Amino acid sequence: MAEYLDANISGEELLEAQAHVWSYSFNYIVSMALKCAVELGVPDAIHRHHAPTASLPALASSLQLDPSKTEPLRRLMRLLVHAGFFTTTTDEEEDEEVRYSLTTATKLLLRGQGPASAFLLLQLDPKTITSWGALSAWFQFSSNPVPYEAGHGGVSFWECMEKDPRQKKSFYDAMVGDSKLVAGVLVSECKEVLEGVESLVDVGGGTGAMAVAIAKAFPKVKCTVFDLPHVVANLKEGGGDDVVKGLENLEVAGGSMFEKIPHADAILLKWILHNWNDEKCIDILKCCLEAVFGDGKKKGKVIIIDMVVGNKAAVEKQELYGVQLCFDLLMLASYNGKERDEKEWETLFKVAGFSGYKIVGSLGPRSIIEAYP
Ligand SMILES: C[S@@+](CC[C@H](N)C(=O)[O-])C[C@H]1O[C@@H](n2cnc3c(N)ncnc32)[C@H](O)[C@@H]1O
Ligand SMILES: COc1cc(-c2oc3cc(O)cc(O)c3c(=O)c2O)cc(OC)c1OC
């Protein structure tokens, strides 16, 4: 036994530890195999198939792969079945051939219509992966609080994105996909959040996907998409993925959430505060408070869709807790932002001047938090 190991460790425990290291060393291979399947169009080919399942030869032929790639495809699919992205059945009465079908997760990865495919491709973009490779150098040598900026000559993620149309498109495609998915759940299963709300501003609303969904589902709510002027510049003229144009109860406003936010009785902050450190969050929240006060009356609320690290959902489902911790590291690396636990949220609201808050629902690893003036 090597001297650095405790003499009491059994051989079984040692080999299990080795497999644990292997498993985490290989995690990216599963991610890359999934990216490969999405790029090949495997989910789409199964979806297009005349039956809800597809055999390996049918799949290979639909993907127009050379016959020599059929066996490698079987091995790719075996890994992704193990990871929960496809299921298999065998028709014993017919040909005993294995047939693949989609799971709910792979339905989210259909090209064009799948709300999570842009997110997957964004996380696995060579640029994103390269920035993770520089994290240890940032810990050791950088005085810039934002790892992303340290690797980009002091330029922020938002500024870099403006100079790189491909990165900008992939970022907003990922955000739009997520907003469509979350908006669908919000308007059908969490309607009470918008009960009694007459006007709403979606702060940092990007290209408007969330506000469009709310405006369509709640025609009596006057909605506004608010983001930096260049982000919302041509939304009214029909830019963006959603039809902002033509919706009577939807306005577009450009400005900065650090300066002035238009008045409304509900201010929505979806996936905003985790991008910022505590000081910046307090500035944003103070601006929100002014926006809901508007006519001087203490009414209205700020609705926040973000993670509450270690919440009940995460305690009950370990995978959700893992997602929260990965997002926290992504926010650290990209913006010096963070995912917050309930105590940290409570402190932010108190310091910004809110009278109270309530966690009113959960959306997978994220929560819906209401903060009151
Ligand atoms: C992570 S995205 C979230 C977008 C959208 N809420 C969603 O969940 O899909 C953050 C948004 O904040 C916007 N943003 C950044 N700085 C801002 C500022 N000073 N004022 C208003 N919006 C800002 C960005 O343009 C971007 O659309
Ligand atoms: C486009 O390249 C990068 C994207 C991100 C980034 O930022 C996010 C911000 C959010 O509020 C929510 C998110 O889900 C995300 C992301 O998923 C995400 O990938 C971060 C980067 O810097 C590390 C990027 O540059 C490479």
Image (cartoon, helix red, strand yellow):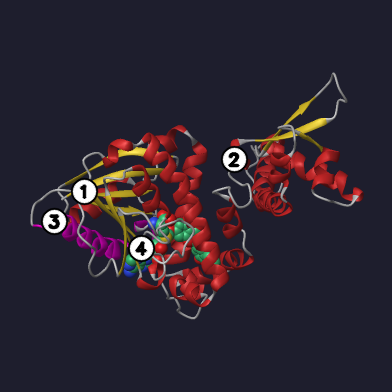
- Which of the pair 108/71 is nearer the observer? 108
Task: Write down the residue under mark 2.
Answer: 105
Task: Write down the residue under mark 1.
Answer: 301
Task: Write down the residue under mark 4.
Answer: 276
Q: Would you say residue 292 sits in the magenta stretch?
A: yes
Residue 45 locus on image (x, y percent): 73, 44
Give the Cα separation between the discs numbered 2 and 4.
30 Å
Q: Residue at coordinates 35% horizontally, 63% vertically from top-left?
A: 276
Task: Write down the residue under mark 3.
Answer: 293
Give the Cα separation between the discs numbered 3 and 2.
42 Å
Give the Cα separation between the discs numbered 4 and 1.
20 Å
Secondary structure category for the residue under label 1: strand
> What segment is highlighted magenta in the picture?
273-295
Secondary structure category for the residue under label 2: helix
Residue type at numbered disc 3 = Phe
Viewer-side label of 2, 4: 2
Give the Cα separation between the discs numbered 1 and 3.
9 Å
Quadrant of the rendered image holding ligand 1? bottom left
- Which of the pair 261/316 is nearer the observer? 261
Whether 201 is drawn above or below 371: the answer is: below
| Residue 353 visible to an observer of this rendering | yes
